[in-house]
Image (spheres, rainbow, N blue to C red):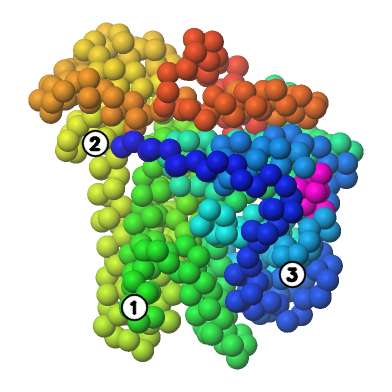
Amino acid sequence: MSYPAKPSAEPCVTTFDEFVQLADYSLMDTLDADPDATVDGDDHRARQVFSGHFVPVTPTPLAEAEYVTHSSTFFKELGLSNELALNEKFRHVFSGDITAAHEPMRQIGWATGYALSILGTEYNQQCPFGTGNGYGDGRAISVFEGIINGQRWEMQLKGGGPTPYCRGGDGRAVLRSSVREFLAQEYMQALGVPTSRSLTLYVSKSETVKRPWYSQNSYSTDPDVLMDDPVAISTRVAPSFLRVGQLELFARRARNKAHPRALEELSMIVSHLMEREYKSDINQNLGFTNQLVELAKLFRQRLTSLVTNWLRVGYCQGNFNSDNCAAGGFTLDYGPFGFCEVFDPWFQPWTGGAEQFSFFYQPIAAEANYYMFWKAVRPLLSEDADALEQFDQVGRSFAEVMEKQVQKMWTAKLGLTEFNPELFKELMQLMTNSAVDYTIFFRELSHIPEDVSALKKSFYGKTSQQLDEQWQSWLKSWCDLVIKDGNLAEISKHMKQTNPKYTWREWLIVPAYQQAMQGDYTLVKELQEVLSYPYDEQSQDVEDKYYRLRPKAFFNAGGVSHYSCSS
């Protein structure tokens, strides 16, 4: 399971004037604006939004914005010169001052509403009005949509200030969470896991907000101090930011006959999703209802593949609600996420998440989100019985497709040609009993060792003679299958392309954002570099620093092993 790099474009956009020429606003030009919105985008107080697909809103600029970093990898893919990130007008726009833009780019952004479901149950409590009409992009404001190298991209400011969906919040993001999201998006891309992307990161030199967090050396479950954190804006980029929860919002309105055009607005947003995310994969000659059947199949494939990849690399979303589930089938919203270090099927970094959003439970959460997608789109097929039956069958088979994907992934991680349930079950038990490091274990296994001693680099504790013997027995059974399957060098090579060497270790990320809060971005950039090549053998210095077990001091540490929802 290897992931070839995308072909890179030679930088061709070197000035801000050239950049703005790429603007092309399909969402604002084809969908409905909230009829109650202001004309100038000065719409920053929490209020109910009753209809429309988006609210025009202007971001709130950072005071004294300073450049932290940008993704040179993504800039290169887009054909943007690295110098552009330091361009004064570019910096103004992507730190929230959209007045620096000029035609064809617009001096107004947009925010969208969406609904919330948790494991298939609809909720309105998170909306301050109790109606669901105030829930949506509370601090994420899209400021650009355009076609770059033949691909449509949307650019969204995270922490861009309050919108009508802010629920009374300040609309800001702090540097800590912004550094985490910035690094995580590009790391996931390097892993070959579909994700939103990171463009730029700017911080205010003078503006701070108070946020609850963990004191130094805290072992508290919940944050125990109130901190003054620097305000930052990161720009995340995706083909669209359409979510399952967004489709749900319009389906709920249609179901409740909230306004005369509710069903039409549902049809419009679903059509827009197909245009933005699935156009090249859906036969445009099909009728609308048959296109919806194809959409259901494609989203099922993408979502099952995505969650399978999460399991492969040890990623736990932490809070996989329908509003955090991208309808395009990629990773979105890096809030209370984490990566499994000590193997635990029920690993959950978020203190509010419990078992329902834990590591191995993610396929169940994905199925619940898919069900809400199915439920939202289904009314649009009501007059086509044949298409409706096909659509329902696609939904009914989600769990089966998910299981096949997951088994195929475990087969690849183990270097085998077919899934062996007994061998896998025994391995999971041994990994749990020995407290192995998830990433280091599978990477060391990729060398195809014959003796368990070679795997002990990944063990957090000492093992008994009995456990060693169980490991040795398992290892022999596994090696016999691998040897039977073919060329060991080739199998080892493919395993190393499936099992990354370098993973996200929160205790190594914390110093990066702590130093960044003091104005030192050296470690942020070092992590960018290391995490850009997660499958590669890197220098000995990098290996010594980043390929090692979590030190005891960081077990059960607040802000490291667990954290409240990121902000």
Disc 1: which residue: 285
- Provide the residue span drawn in magenta: 88-98
Q: In the rendered image, which residue does mark 3 sit on?
A: 56
The residue depicted at 60 percent of the width and 67 percent of the height is 114
Q: Main secondary structure of the magenta part?
A: helix
Quadrant (top left/top right/bottom left/bottom right) for the N terminus:
top left
In this rendering, position of residue 118 left or right of residue 163: left
Q: Which residue is mark 2?
A: 411
- Residue 557: x and y in percent read 62, 26
Picture residue at 76% right of the left edge, 80% below the top: 36
Mark 1 Cα within 10 Å, few/some/many (few <14, many 20+)? few
The spot of residue 228 in percent (x, y) is: 84, 37
Is the residue 230 above or below the residue 544 in the image?
below
Picture quarter with the C terminus = top right
From the viewer's perspective, tell me whether residue 103 is left or right of residue 317: right
Disc 3 to disc 1, C-alpha distance? 34 Å
Disc 1 element: loop
In whole angstroms, how far apart are the C-alphas of marks 2 and 1? 38 Å
Of the pair 504 and 191, the residue shown nearer to us: 191
Compared with residue 272, is residue 354 higher up or lower down, i.e. above or below? above
Q: Residue 392 versus residue 95: which sits nearer the camera? A: 95
